[in-house]
Image (cartoon, rainbow, N blue to C red):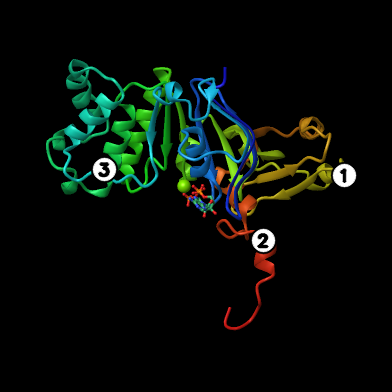
């Protein structure tokens, strides 16, 4: 059973098409990242899953039940995007309130609140009013609140928003621990480097459509480009390799590294054979990778947040632009 599944999911708000046929599947025990520019539809997808907004058409399910099902919703912890917890609460009393809403017993709450706040690094301030918290502290409290009832699925909308680098690392570590304990985590984030570090799979939304989906390794692989290096002093047979039909170039700024790009259907093997037959020693061979950020930027280049390209082009040019 998938923990989250959507099939051809559409959502329109009046004339705005926020989701245009999104199909994705999140399996148990994964950390799954949903990426996209501002306005791509990430929060909308989460809100549909939780029954906060209704889907326009298509299907969405959460823990095997249709999106919005109350029973399934209770097994989910949720950190909303723009949470504003009532200021009159202390960290402790807020956790106590949410815990009781989720049916955690008073005895359990007493034990679990300090533990959970400790995990997010704010236990020392739990008896202070929320209005005295910094932005990052409020965010940590928001995450703690989402973990309070030991949910099967944790949905986090921008979990590290406003959190400092040390705190972000702590939150990443916490997510890894939660995953090891068998929780499934679904998160929205703009921080691609961070997503790359912890997510098992990612999906990239662009203007309501899913444009990429896969493991980080699948998405960042640059198909068929290898970096080769030879033993110091040996000369790379550029011409001979090019004659075999490979694109090859010397990498500037490196000590004798060469980039060999394969065409459709080619393997690196003929190059390796040629080098070895020429008595050369390969000391370095790696398949080139892109960062998730490279992939993302290439995909969304030129697109404005939530705005169609064709509409951009239709805009008058000149006039100080
Ligand atoms: N209640 C609403 N009424 C009208 N339009 C909405 C509403 N909520 C969202 N939208 C529109 O739907 C689109 C998707 O918004 P959404 O909040 O899902 O984006 P997002 O990917 O979460 O963006 P961000 O990264 O800025 O949080 C946007 O064009 C937004 O303006
Ligand atoms: Mg959002």
- Circle 1 Cα neighbour tier, 10 Å, few/some/many (<14 / 14–19 / ≥20): few
Using the rendered view, name the quadrant where residue 178 is placed. top left
Of 22 and 141, which appears nearest the observer?
22
Residue bearing the label numbered 3: 85
Q: Is label 1 or label 2 in front?
A: 2
Which numbered disc flags the more N-terminal residue, 1 or 2?
A: 1
Residue 212 higher or lower than 98, as above or below: below
Q: Is label 3 or label 1 in front?
A: 3
Residue at (34% x, 21% y) in the render? 150
221 displayed left or right of 97: right
> What count of labels does the image hold?
3
The dot on residue 309 is 2
Residue bearing the label numbered 1: 243
State how far apart marks 1 and 2 are (Cα). Answer: 42 Å
Mark 1 touching mark 2, by CB under 8 A? no
> SS of the residue at dot 2?
helix
Q: Horizontal and vertical percent for residue 193?
A: 48, 43
């Amino acid at each position: 059973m998938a923990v989250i599944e959507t099939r051809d999911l559409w959502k329109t708000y009046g004339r705005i098409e926020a989701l245009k046929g999104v199909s994705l599947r999140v399996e148990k025990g994964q950390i799954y990242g949903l990426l996209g520019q501002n306005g791509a539809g990430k929060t909308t997808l989460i809100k549909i899953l939780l029954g906060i907004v209704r889907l326009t058409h298509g299907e969405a399910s959460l823990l095997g039940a249709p999106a919005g099902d109350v029973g399934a919703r209770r097994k989910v912890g949720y950190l909303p995007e723009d949470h504003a917890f009532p200021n009159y609460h202390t960290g402790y009393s807020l956790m106590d309130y949410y815990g009781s809403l989720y049916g955690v017993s008073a005895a359990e709450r007493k034990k679990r609140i300090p533990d959970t706040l400790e995990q997010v690094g704010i236990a020392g301030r739990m008896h202070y009013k929320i209005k005295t918290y910094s932005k990052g502290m409020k965010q940590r409290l928001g995450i703690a609140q989402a973990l309070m009832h030991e949910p099967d699925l944790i949905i986090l909308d921008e979990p590290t928003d406003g959190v400092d680098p040390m705190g972000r690392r702590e939150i990443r570590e916490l997510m890894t621990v939660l995953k090891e304990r068998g929780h499934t985590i679904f998160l929205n984030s703009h921080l691609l480097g961070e997503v790359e570090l912890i997510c098992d799979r990612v999906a990239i939304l662009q203007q309501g459509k899913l444009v990429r989906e896969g493991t980080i390794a699948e998405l960042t692989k640059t198909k068929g480009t290898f970096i080769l290096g030879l033993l110091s002093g040996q000369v790379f047979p550029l011409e001979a390799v090019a004659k075999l039909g490979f694109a090859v170039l010397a990498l500037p700024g490196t000590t004798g590294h060469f980039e060999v790009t394969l065409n459709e259907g080619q393997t690196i093997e003929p190059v390796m054979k040629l080098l070895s037959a020429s008595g050369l020693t390969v000391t370095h061979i790696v398949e080139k990778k892109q960062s998730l950020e490279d992939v993302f930027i290439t995909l969304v280049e030129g697109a404005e947040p939530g705005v169609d390209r064709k509409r951009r082009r239709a805009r008058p040019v000149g006039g100080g632009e």
